[in-house]
Image: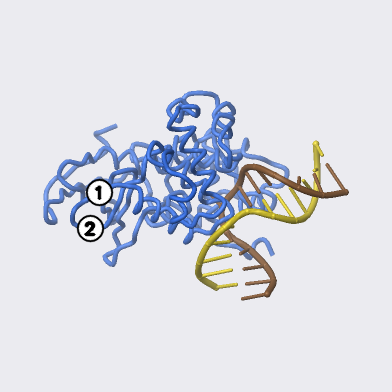
Chain colours: A blue, B brown, C yellow
DNA sequence: GTCCAGGTTTTTA
DNA sequence: TAAAAACATGGA
């Protein structure tokens, strides 16, 4: 696996290290970040993105078939290789999904290079609890206030903060969290933090157990239903069988795959979901 | 002012 | 059981 990539450690900005990773499949960095699976990223003027995950930060730039990472001295590039799921070849998955599926073939003629990110389980769970009946700019704002107020400063030279742990949030009350302006979701966040911190819901175990059991485990949290559970499993636990069904996906399945469900996509249903979701957002007129 | 936002819970019939 | 309504907040 490692020998698929060429690492070049060299050039630097201040005390940052630069890593170049050669891609052997198609990757659209911008779409991958902006397609609704993550919320902590900032597009810079030079076309790069500053991306945060847990207590880590990286600046990343796509330059033709190379992904260029800039990270500070002690940080581990392997975290970000895994985060962007670079060990996996998505061309193979997309080919499989397009085989004998003309609808999907049509979608990938417009949308390509999306990867499923390997985000941290708690951050993903908490973020998608916040996402319910909410819009993306406001979701980002609430998460930014959550990190800014209760996370730790990542670096002395800028204003980026880590995502606060479940333990940290579990000790806060409704009033202390009112600064988030998260509305009715605040009590859901607290309930999730308590259950996760006390291992009443064991996020680590969700990696291996049956997918239905995993959904049930997550739905023990007050404020977590099937959709948030599947988002957590897909984006936070990397369970590709998960298939989050929000309003867009419900409409899209009805229109594009009438009478069918996620089982037509097999074990990579989650990847198909992300493409269909993004395609639907690009073509709202399709539902008129 | 009204409507809507990557849902879920609570209430109602 | 199934279908509405309620839930906080803020931008369009």
Instruction: Identify which residue is drawn at 53% across, 59% down.
Output: A135
Q: Are marks 2 and 1 in contact (CB under 8 Å)?
A: yes
Q: State the residue at coordinates (45%, 36%).
A: A238
| Front residue (pair A239, A115) | A239
Residue A126 appears anywhere in the view: yes
Give the x, y percent position of residue A34: 43, 56
| CA distance separating discs 2 and 1 | 8 Å
Q: Is residue B7 left or right of residue C6?
A: left
Q: Quadrant of residue A218?
A: top right
Q: Secondary structure at mark 2?
A: loop
How many C-alpha atoms fall within 10 Å of the one at disc 1: few (<14), some, or many (≥20)? some
**Residue in front for this viewpoint, A186 or A5:** A186
Image quadrant where residue A78 sits: top left
Residue at label 2?
A158
Relative image position of residue A120 (x, y in whole percent): 39, 39
Name the secondary structure under disc 1. Answer: loop
**A203 lies above or below A228:** above
Residue visible at 23% across and 41% down in the picture: A77
Name the image quarter holding the N terminus of chain A.
top left
**Disc 2: CA contacts within 10 A as few (<14), some (14-19) or many (>=20):** few
Q: Nearer the viewer, residue A79 or A218?
A: A218
Residue A276, visible in the rendered structure: no
Q: Quadrant of the image for the C terminus of chain A?
A: bottom right
């Amino acid at each position: 696996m490692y020998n698929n990539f060429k690492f070049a450690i060299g050039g630097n900005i201040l005390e940052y290290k630069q890593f170049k990773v050669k891609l052997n499949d198609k990757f659209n960095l911008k779409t991958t970040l902006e397609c609704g699976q993550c919320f902590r990223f900032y597009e810079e003027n030079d076309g790069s993105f500053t991306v945060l995950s847990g207590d880590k930060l990286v600046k990343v730039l796509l330059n033709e078939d190379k992904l260029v990472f800039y990270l500070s001295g002690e940080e581990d590039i392997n975290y970000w290789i895994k985060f962007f799921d670079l060990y996996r070849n998505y061309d193979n998955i997309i080919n499989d999904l397009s085989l004998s599926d003309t609808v999907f073939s049509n979608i990938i003629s417009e949308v390509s290079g999306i990867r499923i990110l390997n985000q941290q389980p708690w951050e993903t769970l908490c973020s998608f609890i916040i996402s319910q009946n909410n819009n993306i700019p406001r979701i980002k704002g609430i998460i930014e206030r959550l990190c800014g107020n209760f996370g730790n400063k990542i670096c002395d030279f800028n204003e980026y903060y880590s995502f606060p742990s479940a333990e940290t949030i579990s000790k806060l009350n409704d009033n202390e969290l009112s600064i988030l302006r998260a509305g009715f979701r605040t009590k859901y966040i607290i309930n999730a933090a308590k259950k996760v911190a006390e291992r009443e819901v064991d996020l680590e175990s969700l990696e291996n157990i049956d997918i239905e059991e995993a959904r049930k485990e997550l739905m023990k949290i007050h404020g977590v239903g099937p959709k948030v559970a599947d988002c957590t499993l897909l984006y936070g636990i990397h369970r590709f069988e998960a298939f989050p069904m929000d309003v867009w996906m419900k409409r899209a399945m009805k229109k594009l795959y009438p009478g069918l469900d996620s089982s037509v996509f097999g074990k990579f249903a989650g990847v198909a979901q992300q493409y269909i979701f993004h395609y639907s957002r690009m073509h709202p007129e399709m539902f008129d």
